[in-house]
Amino acid sequence: MKKIVFCTIAIFFLINTNAQVVMNINGKDISKQEFEYFYHKNNSNTSSNYISLDEYVDLFINFKLKVADAYEQKLDTAKSFKDEFNSYRNQLIRPYLTDDSIKEVLVNEAYSRLKEDIEVNHILFRIENQNDTIAAYEKAMSAKKRINKKNFEKIALETSEDPSVKQNKGRLGYVTGMMLVYPFEKAAYDAKIGKVVGPIRTRFGYHLILVTNRRPSNGEIKVAHIFKRKPEKADSASIDSIRTFVNSIYKLASAGSDFAELAKKYSEDEANASQGGVLPWLSIGRTNETFETAAFALKDSGAISKPVEASYGWHIIRLLEKRPIQSLDDSRQQIESRINGDERANIINTSFINKIKKTYNYKAGKGDTIATFANVVLTKDSLNKFSATRPHNSDSLTQFINTSLTDYENSNLEQHYPEFGMLMKEYYDGILLYYVSKEKVWDKASKDTAGLRMQFEQNKEKYRWKKPHYKGIIVYCVSKEIKDKAADIIKTAPKDSVSQYLKRQLNVNKTINVKIESGIYEQGRNQVIDALVFNEGSLPINEKFPEVLVDGYIQKEYPETYKDIKGPVSNDYQEILEKSWIDSLRKTYPVIIYDNILKTVK
């Protein structure tokens, strides 16, 4: 065992504040910066639980001694510890491995586009072979030369490889921000009305884009509808008959009949008819354009549209509510989430990579050296090993360089960002504290039945009941007949197995005839026990299990065993183990306090 060294040393350190050491515990220096971080994080002058510096020093030493004990037991090398810490760290590093300035630009750009709808048309030229994009590009350029102000639809029908072109003639209708792939969206929002732009490359191919109108966003609407399906291959007489029927429903709705009841009775939209035809909030470009146009044309809440005929049937639409586009603050989380999931994430990552390339003086190499940065040399051999784990990656060189740069930055975050380093230290020591406390105190207390029994027996007066308690079971029965059978079983069954006997003999053929609760019930805390045992109040009504009986006994003054009051006994025993552990730690691990530095803590 190590001898205790606990003393106060007054030595003047000619070093900067961040490197000043306030104490040394088991050979490890504790910096003034670390001590102040924990002191201020766990304390406040305004808090009713304010702890003085002298008091906190004692608590801090206990904390660090426990962590030192965890290190001595090599708990920091356990896989469970490493996995838990790395999981926390991986969640917390994300804001540091990105370019927040570029992200903010993209968030504001996306929000500004959400405030404006644009009417868009396009012609698509697919890329058949990703290694040969020239053919698609040349087709797009050839078509673009033929387009004038009046023939976009004609050229779209003749050349577009979008499967929907026959139906929409290249017209996408009104769209808003974050609805389209980012390169397409950017080109469309940057375009002038009436001017064809492109070819624009997206993952779908090359696009020629024509914007024909712009307008402020209509926000979102909530509507209900009554839908009548248009049968396939219906003749004109059938169509006329359905149209007449739809008009009759519209007249009922317009005359004041309950719209929700009409929807429940007549609507053929199975997804929402039973809810009165109510649809989720709608924004532009999210549904059929004919339906959308009619719905957004409604001005006032309660307004009802005339029957709207779409390709698949008729709709009668009622406006329930309108709301404008949310503020940037309210929209930010959703916008950032969508940015992280589309091409904009690549823009942010590229900017981040370029920044750390500059920070670490990244230089392309020659021969077997691919590149150098900081004190790292990337070689062709390391690239080959990296590529072997990603056989289907078409751009393994770029990914290898980017991953190497990111990993290096990640490994140096604690040094570059002191506040992050302190947070990681807090998590690291905190998790170690949990594991060592679990082993030394919590698990030990729960398993040491002899210690718990002794704690209870030697301190019985401390655990005396303030009110009588009833220890036993409550048996809920489905009928008087079952209750009588249960009473007979209770008389003959072993006292420690009554519940099992009742369930085995009465809950047969998957039929639940009895429901059993067991416990220790304080007088005034359970209506059934109060009524049947303490003769207080009335028995609560239970329709499924109307008959009730109890089996047990009253503990008037004291719990029978420590198990009857295990929570308080266990807590008290844990305190004893904790104190014994701390006493042992203070005798085992040396603690040195540098008093002159400690006095400068603010």
Image: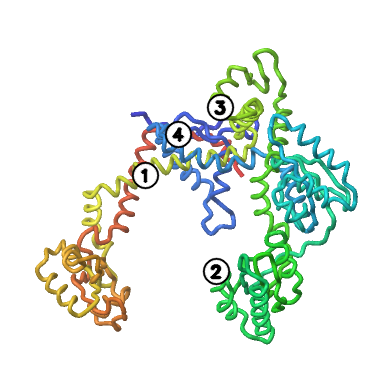
Name the residue rendered at 57%, 53% in the picture: 44
**Which mark is nearer the camera, 1 or 4?**
1
Dot 4, how many residues are within 10 Å of its Cα: few (below 14), some (14-19), or many (20+)? Answer: many
**Which mark is nearer the camera, 1 or 3?**
3
Instruction: For marks 3 and 2, give the CA distance.
Output: 47 Å
Instruction: For marks 2 and 4, give the CA distance.
Output: 73 Å
Q: Is residue 15 visible?
A: no
Residue 21, above or below 302? above
Name the residue rendered at 36%, 44% in the picture: 438
Name the residue carrying label 3.
Answer: 391
Instruction: For marks 1 and 3, give the CA distance.
Output: 45 Å
* Amino acid at circle 2: Glu
21 on left or right of 76: right
From the image, which quarter does the N terminus lie in? top left
Name the residue carrying label 4.
Answer: 591
Name the residue carrying label 2.
Answer: 270
State the SS at label 4. Answer: strand
457 on left or right of 355: left
- Number of labels in the image equals 4
* Amino acid at circle 3: Pro
Between discs 1 and 4, the one toward the N terminus = 1
